[in-house]
Image (cartoon, rainbow, N blue to C red):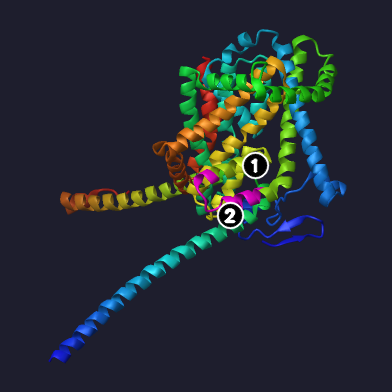
Amino acid sequence: MTAERKDQEELRDMEVELELILQDAEVTVAKIREELAQHRQLRRQREQIERLPEYLAQTEVRWRDMRVLLDEVRSELSAGEQDAAEANGAAGASDAGASGADGAAEGSAEGPDEGAARPAS
Amino acid sequence: MFTFRSPCGVTVHDMTTSPLADERKSPSREEHATSEEVAHLSSPFERFGLTGRALQIVNWLAVVAAVYVLITAVGVIGSGFKIATGDQAETLFEFATNPIIGLMIGVVATALTQSSSTTTSVTVGLVAGGLPLTVAIPIIMGANIGTTLTNTLVSLGMVKDKDAFRRGFAAATVHDFFNLIAVAIFLTLEMAFGLLERLSTSLASVSSGTDGGFVASIFGGIGTVVEVITEPLADGIEAGLGWVPGMWQGIAMIVVAVALILMVINFIGRLLKVLMVGRAKQVLHAAIGRNPLTGIASGTAVTVMVQSSSTSTALAVPLAGSGAFTLKQIYPYTLGTNIGTTVTALISAFAFTGPEATIALTAAYVHLLFNVLAVTLIYGLPFLRNLPPRGATWLAALAAEKKIYAAIWVLGVFVAVPLALILVTSL
């Protein structure tokens, strides 16, 4: 009985110890990941700085970039207008559908004879 | 990146991983330039077959010659302004006593020339020729805002890549926001207390003039030597325009000198890019992963090396656009460029001797103090420090979603608002 309890206690201690080791390992892994990310960022920064001659050559202002921007703005605006027109069209169609339904409802409310007497438009 | 020489002798780079590369491959770009052909740094003397050490020596000699022409041209502006205005400079420039007009003149002139160094050098020359300092100070401040147009335009090159554009536009406009805040604070202080005028006058009296002591005698000595060297060319320009009658001679001298300054500043910038690219790389490598002060120092150093804040801030755009550098890392570097660019005005002040040298140096100190104090105050106070990056991040997020915001910003800040303010304040 005493030996069994001792074994159980030993197992519990071992579990606690393993849990602690696992926690330590997780902290270490997180630290390594962080350091790795920093190293990667530094490497990317150094690579970018190595491209300085290329970037320096590109520091000249190209006024055509302004034209590219204005073209983008124009296409965005026309896309927006198209979307709005499509939305209006869809809304108009659903309104027409709804009003048609209303009309049918009205017609049925007015009575079959009056509805039938109305000229088709 | 792969580099090879094409059969026609053009150096060609494979730009597949550049933040600007995607743009070069877009159809709109291809209309204007072959997608893979990219400008590379080259000296204008390479076309004469010079290479290696000989090319480097010729480049440096050309820089020295260009600085000589710059200083001479600034001196010519001073003389031309005197001839053009007589002793009536204050009366003639009464229209610009409104600081908003002066500020907008600085913004528009710099945006048009794409060079704050040109605006500040010309202003230094005009101040030495009699332009009141109260008129010149807002022009100098306006130059700071105008120069930010360059990097903003460079960021437009990424407009087709949403994420790169958001990052690049934020890196560009952080400079806009910083300079707008700096001008809002220091122009108000200037109008209320004459802060910069007082400080720079005191500093100039210590470093120039007969009562200035040791520093002043060194500056005076340099000024005398420079005057002796530059006098023949300055006299030559004046004599060459001697046929122009009366005050028009002065105006012609100013026009010629401004054209020369614009030309030589561009020329110096082009040569220094070639000559200093290696050093600039060293400076930036050394600044990586360090504190913001090192970032500010690296921005200052790179700008002094290439003699152009437009170039050094435009350089930050692809660095940020690539995603390798965060806005937080780019921001201090950008502030340093504001300080580095003040060197050109200081060099220009050496065009004068005697009392003219003191007043020219005062104008150059205004530029220096404005930028140093702005960086110290805005970056030093946490609640102000975070405003430019926040503003830039917000604007860049908007502009990346809808490009119309980018267009409104560029045309509004650099064209519509300055012109509207000039019109409104002139009425």
Is B236 on the left-hand or right-hand side of A87?
right
Whether discs 1 and 2 lie on one chain: the answer is no
Number of marks in the image?
Answer: 2
> Which residues are the magenta region?
B280-294
Q: Which residue is drawn at 66% across and 23% down?
A: B214
What is the number of the mark on residue B233? none
- Report x, y in % for residue B62: 80, 38
Quarter of image, res B131: top right
- Nearer to me, B64 or B406: B64
Q: What element carries label 1?
A: loop
- Report x, y in % for residue B69: 78, 29
Q: Which residue is drawn at 62% across and 30% down?
A: B110
Quarter of image, res B72: top right
What is the number of the mark on residue B19? 2
Identify the amino acid type marked 1. Answer: Val
Determine if residue A67 is in view: no
- Give the prevailing secondary structure in the magenta stretch: helix
Residue placed under numbered mark 1 in the picture: A61
Is B171 on the left-hand or right-hand side of B235?
left
Q: Is B287 within the magenta?
A: yes
- Report x, y in % for residue B9: 81, 56
